[in-house]
Amino acid sequence: MYSHRFKVDIYITRHARERMASRNITESELLELIERGTVKYKDATRFWIAMHVESRQDNLLSIAAVLEDKLVVKTVMHHFEWEDK
């Protein structure tokens, strides 16, 4: 899988794949989230991306990721809410 937005390959950890399966999140939904979601950075390489998916009833879908030589999806969440800072 490749991100045109970040111009790198995407690596999905085993943990993230397990969370995708348990939350019925498809690879196409994940890719749409990466390409079109709202990004909030924790620091230069770590961030979250979240997006409401109209066809789902579980609030925002979100990923926690690291961007280095590839985009590493560490986990996938649903019922996500942004923290106020």
Image (cartoon, helix red, strand yellow):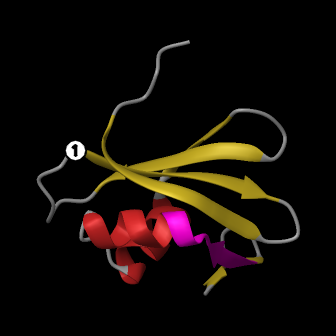
Q: As displayed, is residue 9 above or below residue 70?
A: below
Residue visible at 24% across and 71% down in the picture:
24
In the rendered picture of this protein, how many numbered marks are placed on residues?
Answer: 1
Q: Quadrant of the C terminus?
A: top right
Q: Nearer the viewer, residue 22 or 30?
A: 22
Residue visible at 41% across and 69% down in the picture:
18
Q: Position of residue 3 (x, y in %)?
A: 65, 77
Q: As displayed, is residue 27 above or below residue 50?
A: below
> Where are the magenta residues, as a range?
9-15
> In the figure, is residue 55 to the left or right of 29?
left
Q: Quadrant of the N terminus?
A: bottom right
Residue type, numbered disc 1: Asn
Report if residue 58 lies within the magenta region. no
Q: Position of residue 12 (x, y in %)?
A: 59, 73
Q: Quadrant of residue 56?
A: bottom left
Q: Position of residue 33 (x, y in %)?
A: 44, 63
> In the figure, is residue 55 to the left or right of 73?
left
Q: Which residue is mark 1?
A: 59
> In the figure, is residue 28 to the left or right of 7?
left
